[in-house]
Amino acid sequence: MLNIHNLSNYRFAKRKTILRKDYTLFQRLKRTKYKFFKSRITKSFDLVFTFKNTYHIYLLLIKKIIKKFELINYSFTTKINIMKLNKCIKTLMKCPNSKYLGVFSIICIYWRYNFESWFFPYLMPHLRIPKEVKYQIIVQLPSEGILNIPKNCFISLFPLYKVYKNYRFGRIIADLPLLVSKYISTKRRIKHIKKHVY
């Protein structure tokens, strides 16, 4: 099971700004098309950070563009392994116990088949070569640490019940609570409920 720690144990710091390569969906798809013809399929990783506050579990989202929330994302055109991905995660967070920080599990894989905005959570039999593959990875955080976010990004924390099926966040983020729930231990909570129900 995933160990989720209190939000009060963490601090947020600003690091140098990251220049955004695309500001609209059209620019993003155009860049995906260029990457595909240059080095074939693009691999991107969405990092899912979870925190606990007043018995609720919160999801960390960042805002780069007004009215658009995103997960922290890395994209690669070369081969990637767990070691490289863990190194990227450790640049985001400074903590005394770095051995407890890293990839916990892949919770979903999405595929982009054409140069369109849609992602699908399964492989379609009639399409041979996908244009992009997106991995959603839940991150195991240590008990305390400092999370470094670029200056041009705004941090937002939302409880899972507000994100669930709320499509203003987008379909991929709105389905996250369903995927994250299987990694959350609810034994204590169920025991408490049984006392009052039975």
Image (cartoon, grey):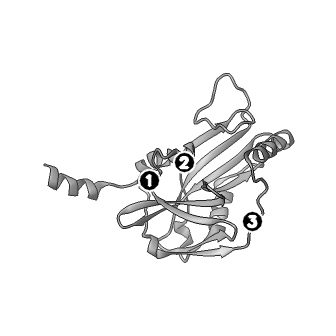
Residue 24 location, x and y as percent? Answer: 74, 49
- Using residue 14 as the reference point, say whether residue 42 is left or right of it: right
Residue 190 location, x and y as percent? Answer: 25, 53
Residue 109 location, x and y as percent? Answer: 59, 41
Between disc 3 and disc 1, whose residue precedes? 3
Mark 1: amino acid = Lys
Q: Quadrant of residue 125?
A: top right
The residue most toward the top is 126
Q: Which residue is mark 1?
A: 162
Q: Mark 3 touching mark 1, by CB under 8 A?
A: no
Between disc 2 and disc 3, whose residue precedes? 3
Residue 168, label in figure? 2
Taking depth in this image into account, of 139 and 28 the one nearest to the observer is 28
Neighbours of disc 2 within 10 Å: few (<14), some (14-19), many (20+): few
Mark 3: amino acid = Ile
For image coordinates 55% across by 49% down, the residue present is 169
For image coordinates 57% across by 52% down, the residue present is 137
The residue most toward the left is 198
Q: Please state which of the two labelled residues, at mark 2 or mark 3, is closer to the viewer.
A: 2
Taking depth in this image into account, of 103 and 123 the one nearest to the observer is 123
Mark 2: amino acid = Arg
Residue 173, label in figure? none
Q: Which residue is mark 3?
A: 18
Neighbours of disc 1 within 10 Å: few (<14), some (14-19), many (20+): few
Secondary element at image label 3: loop
- Using residue 152 as the reference point, say whether residue 70 is left or right of it: left
The alpha-carbon separation of the residues under discs 3 and 1 comes to: 29 Å
For image coordinates 65% across by 58% down, the residue present is 66
The alpha-carbon separation of the residues under discs 2 and 3 comes to: 25 Å
Residue 174 location, x and y as percent? Answer: 51, 46
